[in-house]
Amino acid sequence: MELTGVINNGAVVFDQPCGIPDGTKVTVRIGDLSKEQPAPATLGKRLLKHAGTVAGLPEDLAEQHDHYLHGTPKR
């Protein structure tokens, strides 16, 4: 679970009600929220590492994928 909030008079005040009972022990990690976080890699970039790794596929699969998937005539 990750909650955000601010310190107010020495106590953590959460941004949203969280329902944590009084007396519950917690650990607080201080983060520098002013630093911009790097954008996660797009799906295309994550899949690119697999490009060219499958053996035995037809060389014209990219151009003729409808033929191989649906049986349409080759173009």
Image (cartoon, helix red, strand yellow):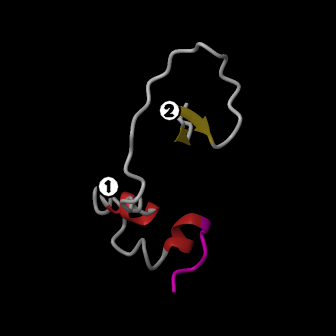
Q: Position of residue 9 (x, y in %)?
A: 54, 36
Q: Where is residue 55 in the image (x, y as percent from the top left)?
A: 29, 55
Residue at the top extreme?
23
Secondary-structure class at tag 1? loop
Rendered position, 67 above or below 49: below
Q: Name the residue under label 1.
A: 54
Q: Position of residue 18 (x, y in %)?
A: 68, 31
Secondary-structure class at tag 2? loop
Depth check: 5 or 70 in front? 5
Which amino acid does the dot numbered 2 rest on?
Gly
Rendered position, 43 above or below 24: below
Span colored in magenta: 70-75
Res 28 → quadrant: top left
Membership of 24 in magenta stretch: no
Q: Position of residue 40 (x, y in %)?
A: 41, 58
- Between circles 1 and 2, the one closer to the viewer is 2
Q: Mark 2 points at which residue?
A: 10
Q: Residue at x 65, y 22 (%)?
A: 20
Res 62 → quadrant: bottom left
Kindly check if marks 1 and 2 are in contact, taking CB atoms under 8 A apart as contact: no
Rendered position, 33 above or below 18: below
Which amino acid does the dot numbered 1 rest on?
Val
- Give the overall secondary structure of the magenta segment: loop
